[in-house]
Image (spheres, grey):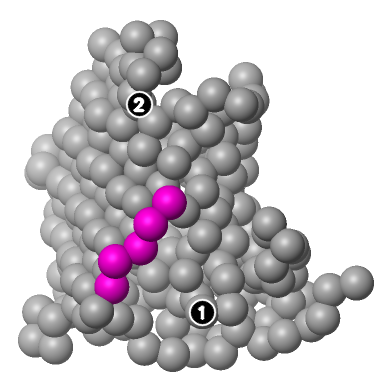
Amino acid sequence: MLMLFMFLSTALPSYEELVYSVKYGVMTAGELRLEYKQDSLKGNYVRCEERTNGVMAFIFSIEDWYESFSDSNFTTQRFEKDIKEGNYKKHLSVVIENGQATYQDGKVVPVIECAKDIINIWYWLRTQELVPGDTIIVPLHADKKNHEVKTVIREEKVNGRNCIAVVPNLTGIKTFGSKGGIVMYYDEDKTPVKFTVKFKWGDLEVELKRRNAN
């Protein structure tokens, strides 16, 4: 039986690098890297890079990156992503200010208050008090649409350790190449040690290999 514990809100490090191994079944499919920087004047910066390697790179090549710039509360101010998956390529950038999002194609859409993006949401959650059994609503802006994401907090074992499982309902929202079906696992030190991404053709498991922080 798991022992219920509360995941208290604490400050993030000023810098953190997280490197993950991506597995599909028993096969190592690639690597994912998250970099976080905190600046007392400029706010928060997050960069995510994901790429396939080895045999998987020959089957289906992925070289994606995402960047998020946000204020001290992780309210997004600028977001950019560059997608290269097989023959598919797409670049998107958006600037958010005064309650409006301006996209690179010139389209302007209203944004809900305190909206996060698909990258910084995982860091913002680490600054919140999370209790297993609770459900919280996360304001999210992605691809010209606003979402109030219902997010369930659970407690689960990961490699014999008690972890908090954060389960957002991302149905219809494309993240990491998947439309929904993501679970993030945080350990007692608030480090995201694992997450799973569900696809129609199977699940990817992303596990932490190393962490550098100060």
Question: Furthest residue to the right?
Answer: 1
Residue toward you, 148 or 192: 192
Q: Which mark is residue 146?
A: none
Circle 1 residue: 189
Residue name at image x 47 percent, y 70 percent:
191
Give the CA distance from mark 1 to mark 2.
Answer: 29 Å
| Residue 148 shows in this picture | no
Picture layout, residue 113 above or below residue 25: below
Residue name at image x 26 percent, y 34 percent:
64
Left or right of 41 in this view: 7: right
Q: Which residues are magenta?
A: 209-213
Residue toward you, 174 or 29: 29
* Quadrant in which residue 69 is drawn: bottom left
Residue toward you, 158 or 73: 158
Disc 1 marks a residue whose amino acid type is Asp
Q: Position of residue 139 (x, y in %)?
A: 45, 68
Circle 2 residue: 52
Does 195 lie within the magenta span?
Answer: no
Q: Secondary structure at mark 2?
A: strand
Residue name at image x 46 percent, y 53 percent:
208
* Quadrant in which residue 163 is drawn: bottom right
Residue toward you, 15 or 118: 15
